[in-house]
Amino acid sequence: MDKSRRQLLTGAASAGALASLPAANALAQQQPPGTVSNDPIKAEKVPAMQWHSERPLTGSVPAHEHDFDVTPSHRMYVRNNLLTPLIDINSHRLTVKGLVDKELTLSVFDLSKSFKTVSMQGMLECAGSGRTGYQPKASGTPWLVTGGMGCPKWGGVRLSDVLKAAGVKAGAAHVAGQGGDPGMVPTAAPVIRSIPMAKAMDENTLIAWSMNEEPLPWVHGYPLRLVVPGWVGSASTKWLHTITLLDAPFKGTYMDSSYRVPRTPIEPGTKMPPDAVSAESWPIKSMITWPVPNARVKGAVTVRGRAWVGEGLVERVEISTDEGKSWQRAQLAPVGDRYAWRTFTYEHKPDRPGYVTFLARAWDDRGNPQPAIPAWNPLGYFWNGWHRVGVLVEA
């Protein structure tokens, strides 16, 4: 984070402290509204971040860089649909309109003063996370098999509280968020996604201004974004400026052309069927975050990882050391926030030296297992195949 921005954001380290931001936006005085260069964005990330594309900017870290109960901001994946805007927090306004009794126009400071501030840990994951695992190749950003996700702590206000203040009219069925990210060409479609009213009214769906008790980084939506935990990341609109209540799902590029999946499994390599549906919650998934692939170890090995599911609960995680012939239950950490991932551990005591491969699979509380290989789909969404890590046990 550059010095001028750090000075600007002093006093805003947590959601509850946002109102203490200075009235004058020092950064806005130095730089006119526009877009942020990718260079400082990249500089805020760890060297292990693997950048997949430049315009739009996308990047992620592999599983062994995720060995944290709470994802550090500098390890949080980056997924832009367009460019990263530079926004003056003092002039920024959020408009709530559509099927409401009273249209609202709110500053970031209005939100912090008028509504209860909350914080929670919640999973966000790009719909295409793990896309490179699919064969044949699916179209889209070549996310690592364990790349494109994170579980930081978010702070802000509940979307439901703001909608209640506007008054939800009968017939409102979907809530659309519109972001302020500009396109590389003037004709680029605006980034707009809508979610069902039930998800919008979930107490964990936020209008967020902080991540890990610091103001949102530029690339993660500063100064406001939606956080729709457990669902595909595209639902969590960044640089949020407009919320519209609709009587049906929004019709547009990011609802009708992308972020869609087949209703039922289709033949690999075929086109998206016409009755495809919008991608929503993530299926059960887990990954091993320790040990590092191909590590050399002696004695007992503590396997550690993270498991999560878009809706519901992680019921158990199992580890195999014989290519799935047998499975042993791992120990799960206590349940935390509803949409937070859960840490699991498994103590392996090798009976001889040599190469050993650990496989991880999770089950949710509805009886759904993490598959060895998930059903193929044209856009490569929802990869949740078994994760494997091999190590060399030395004598």
Image: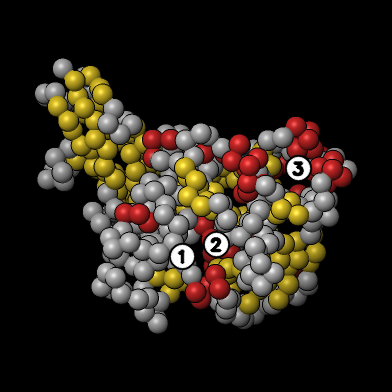
Q: Position of residue 372 (x, y in %)?
A: 23, 54
Tell me the crowding category of disc 3: few under 14, some 14 to 19, or many 20 or more residues within 10 angstroms, Cα based: many
Which residue, as the protein is rendered here, is positioned at the far top? 395
Q: Where does the N terminus fall, quadrant-wise? A: top right
- Viewer-proximal residue, 383 or 139? 139
Residue type of the residue flagged with mark 3:
Leu
Q: CA distance from mark 3 to mark 2?
A: 24 Å
Depth check, mark 3 against mark 2: the one in front is 2
Q: Position of residue 304 (x, y in %)?
A: 33, 33
Q: CA distance from mark 1 to mark 2?
A: 8 Å
Residue annotated with mark 3: 18
1 or 3: tag closer to the N-terminus = 3
Q: Quadrant of residue 40?
A: top right
Q: CA distance from mark 1 to mark 3?
A: 31 Å
Q: Position of residue 78 (x, y in %)?
A: 54, 49
Residue at 44%, 61% in the rendered image: 140
Tell me the crowding category of disc 2: few under 14, some 14 to 19, or many 20 or more residues within 10 angstroms, Cα based: many
Residue at 41%, 41% in the rendered image: 62
103 is higher (above) or lower (below) than 130: below
What mark, if any, has residue 136 been given in the picture?
A: none
132 is higher (above) or lower (below) than 394: below
What mark, if any, has residue 280 been given in the picture?
A: 1
Q: Are marks 3 and 2 in contact (CB under 8 Å)?
A: no
Q: Are marks 1 and 2 in contact (CB under 8 Å)?
A: yes
Is residue 116 visible to us here? no
What mark, if any, has residue 235 been given in the picture?
A: 2
